[in-house]
Image: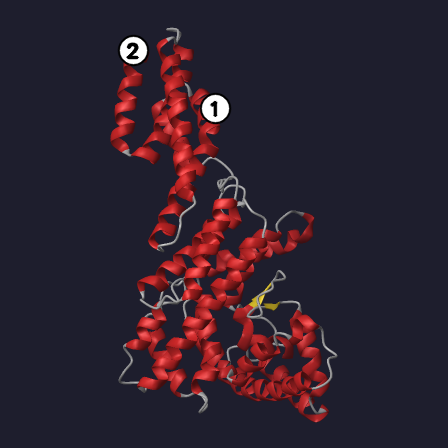
Amino acid sequence: MTGLVSAEELEQRLFTLQPRQFLELYRLYEKLGNKANVQPEMQILRRRLVRMRPVRALTLSRLLCQPFEEFLVNEATGDTGLIMRRSCTAIARLVRRKLAPELLRRFEQRLLHLNQRPEDRAGQILLGREVWKAAAAALAEVRCGPARSPEDLRRRFGLITGCLEIGEAMVSLSRGIPEGRVDTLDDSGRKLLVKLLRGLPHDRTGHARYLMAMLTRRLENPASVIQMLAREDRNLPGATRQNLIRVIRGEIESSIGASAAALLVGEAGTGESVRRAERLLDRLGQIKASGTATPKTDRAARDIADTLGSIERLISVETLQQDRQEQIRQLLPTELSAGLEHAETYRELESEIDNVIRLGDRIDTLGVDNPLRQRRDRLRRDIDGRRAEMMRRLADTPADPEMQARARAGFYGLVRMVEMLDGPKAAENMRRDGDRLLAG
């Protein structure tokens, strides 16, 4: 499935499915399990499943993890702001071990009662308040005690405990944001955030760090929250707003810094690496546009640009896009095989040019040295050499219809490369010259 479209495009398509259709698809993939190579798709499916929260038996472990559900990931990462999903079992085990037996029995009994009334969301929140408070105290005790838990988990105790301490606010904000890719908070989301911020403990900006970290994970443009907070002068004191802006800017910088570091050590040249870099560059551009850039964001921009410059080939398209196939069919309806053959030949070059232009333009907006400019110049020289050779060959093309069709297909593929690098006017001039040579 991911061989036909990018992971990002696949995720966008999955989020447009109706809930019933999505759940049917998820159950199908779940049956396949490890029998087929579907784990990349399963990770994407789980991201929507988390947001949908279909009716499932409520266990102590599931209820316990709700406040930090947004920070759960399936793969290991060096980012201390993320938690391995498999750690939930260890966390629940630690909490169970610390809770008084009678309190644990009472929680389990109430869970049984709630599972008979799955629509009772208020009851779940009421129980959650008690569970999250007790769990936060239990984990704080474990954190201060002897180092008996795994080091990877102990590094995340601060995040886990902080989310549990304001568990109801974390769950409310998570459920108050629409599922899918959300660019900014809408009006209802803004009002909910302000309400939750005003209801936090006296250490408002300290606890707010976890709400801001969630927004950094959920929103495509988390820097928009900075601008939103700046306008909330009627609802939040000036000092509080400034502290909150500092907090979310720090969360965005930490998130980008960790992602940029992962990009530096990750597998270079893969489509996923290019997509991650593009998303990071977009976020850095949003911060710059908000007027809150700092030396940290500038350093991250330089690191990402240098990493992209060191990747030998930026190809991210795994297969020929459908619209390119349609374009070839329109050009050469009677010689489809010849057209598609040449389209395949140019596929990787087109993808490379597209990535160099798209990523290079983003780097330029950030005001850092752009190593992709040199890459673009090399591509232009390559295309110029191919164009000169192609024009020489066109003049000698025999009058045979099949050979003419093949020559035209290859020529039009090169015209497309010229259009991408030098614009439509240069491409149209080249097309006219080539057509005259073929007609002569």
Q: Position of residue 114 (x, y in %)?
A: 58, 82
Q: Which mark is on residue 277?
A: none
- Return the residue nearer the eye: 330 or 150: 150
**What's under tag 1, amino acid-wise?**
Glu
Q: Answer whether labels 1 and 2 touch (C-beta < 8 Å).
A: no
- The residue wearing badge 1 is 341
**Helix, strand or loop status at disc 1:** helix
Q: Position of residue 268 (x, y in %)?
A: 56, 47
- Identify the residue shown where x is 59% and y is 54%: 265
**What's under tag 2, amino acid-wise?**
Ala
Q: Is residue 156 above or below residue 179?
A: below
Label 1 crowding class (10 Å Cα cut-off): few <14, some 14-19, many 20+?
Answer: some
- Identify the residue shown where x is 47% and y is 54%: 304
Q: Earlier in the sequence, mark 1 or mark 2?
A: 1
- Placement of the N terminus among the 4 image quadrants: top right
Distance between mark 1 and mark 2 Cα atoms: 22 Å
Q: Is residue 386 above or below residue 437?
A: below
> Can the viewer see residue 25 in this picture?
no
The answer to whether residue 161 is left or right of residue 329 is right
Q: Position of residue 20 (x, y in %)?
A: 49, 59
- Return the residue nearer the eye: 102 or 161: 161
Label 2 crowding class (10 Å Cα cut-off): few <14, some 14-19, many 20+?
Answer: few
- The residue wearing badge 2 is 439
